[in-house]
Image (cartoon, rainbow, N blue to C red):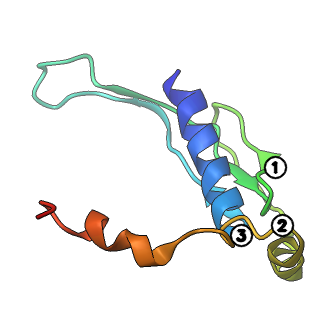
Amino acid sequence: RQLNAWIISQQAHAVANGLPVISVNRVGHEPDPSGQTNGILFWGNSFVVGPQGEFLTQASNSQENLVVEIDLLRSESVRRYWPFLRDRRIEEYGGITKRFID
C-alpha cells in the first residue's frame, strides 16, 4: 500500500503543477544499527512521470540506472490546454497559513 500511495501522490504532484516529476527511491535492506528493529526495506521503483501523470519510465525493485528524455516544452502546452489550477481561489488561502483561525 505504501508503494502505491507514494506513486499516486507523485503523479498527483505532476498533474497539479503541470510538470514532469522525477521520483527516486533507494533499494535494498538497511539494518537498524541499534538492533531494536529489523531495519528498513527500501522498495526501489524509482520513476519519471510527465506533466499529466503518465509514466515515462520506471525502475524495478533492483538497483538500476534510467535515462529518459523529457520534453520541457510539453509542460507549457499541458498548462495552456489543461489549466488544472486555474480555478483555485488563492485569496482564500490566508486561513491555512495560520496555526489558529481567530
Image marks 1 and 2: residues in contact by CB distance under 8 Å: no
Q: Position of residue 43 (x, y in %)?
A: 53, 30
Gap between marks 1 and 2 measured at Cα = 23 Å
* Number of marks in picture: 3
Which residue, given by chain and number where applicable, does mark 1 sit on? 57
Quadrant where the C terminus sits is: bottom left
Q: Nearer the viewer, mark 2 or mark 3?
A: 2
Q: Quadrant of residue 59?
A: top right
Quadrant for residue 29, please give it: top left
Seen in the picture, residue 92 relative to 15 is either above or below; the reply is below
Mark before the other along the chain sequence, 2 or 3: 3
Amino acid on which the number 2 mark rests in the picture: Trp
Q: Position of residue 95 (x, y in %)?
A: 27, 66
| Distance from Cα at disc 2 to Cα at disc 3 | 12 Å
Q: Which residue position is annotated with label 2?
A: 82
Q: Where does label 3 land, which residue? A: 19
Question: Seen in the image, is 41 located left or right of residue 16?
Answer: left
Q: Is residue 65 visible?
A: no
Nearest to the observer: residue 49 or residue 31 = 49
